[in-house]
Amino acid sequence: MCSQLDKFLEVAAGEVGYIEGPADNETKYQKANQPWCGAFVNWCAKQVGLKIPDCTYTPAGAKAFAEAKRWQLVAEAEPLPGDLAFFDFPADGIDRISHIGIVEEVKANGTVIVIEGNTSPDVKGDQRNGGQVCRKIRAYKVKNRGKVLPSLPVFIVGFGRPKFKECKCSTKKNSSQLVAPTQEQEQPQSQLSISLTRHAL
């Protein structure tokens, strides 16, 4: 693995299984003991020299991606590995974006594998303040997983796409290299503002 994207995913994968403590929300990813899903993403990016908006406060992170025109609403999204998935869990009592994770793999069935900090390894635990780094299967399409497995609820609001540095050790284009969304993929700024205002208040 030589690309910045590969290294970013490798760092995140290496943290799976990490558990906060001994104090509540105490981690190596931040100085203050506060909910740390965004701090985890910031930390992973820092390890590989990846510049991303500060995602400590997830609504602000989403807004920054939108302003940089590197945001896709989930309904029209075509996610890629390395994208940052922003979540709103209706049952958590917070009517806004309140969680973030790193897309590790995109499945053809409308789901993504996401590495998330401060979540729970099972569906019964707190999804945005569960105290662990976990791999999660998350849906980004309403109809997902097909007939064999029941569809999962869609909690992802949208995806932010970091700008990754290309690998210098090869002139061959990496098919997984992230690029900025095309104009057709981007939402008009007014629509983005409306969506983020609704979720980030």
Image (tube, rainbow, N blue to C red):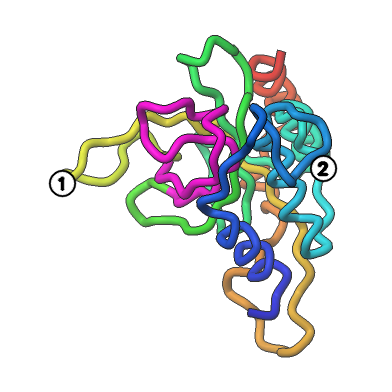
Residue 113 drawn above or below residue 11: above
What residue does disc 2 label? 53
Seen in the image, is 145 located left or right of residue 37?
A: left
Residue at point 65% right, 62% down?
11
Q: Is residue 189 magenta?
A: no
Residue 73 visible here: no
Q: Amino acid at mark 1?
A: Val
- Residue that extends furthest to the front in the rendered view of this protein: 22
Regarding mark 1 in the picture, which secondary structure is present there? loop
Instruction: Determine whether 26 is above or below 162 in the image.
Output: above
* Quadrant of the rendering where the N terminus is positioned: bottom right
- Spatial CA span between label 1 and label 2: 39 Å
Q: Sequence-wise, which precedes: disc 1 or disc 2? A: 2
Q: Is residue 101 visible?
A: yes
Q: How many numbered marks appear?
A: 2
- The span shown in magenta is 112-138
Snapshot quadrant of residue 13: bottom right
* Label 2 CA crowd tier, 10 Å (few <14, some 14–19, many 20+): some
Query: Which residue corresponds to the image point at 33% horizontal and 34% vertical from the top-left?
Result: 152
Q: Which residue is mark 1?
A: 148
Residue 20 on image: x %, y %: 61, 39
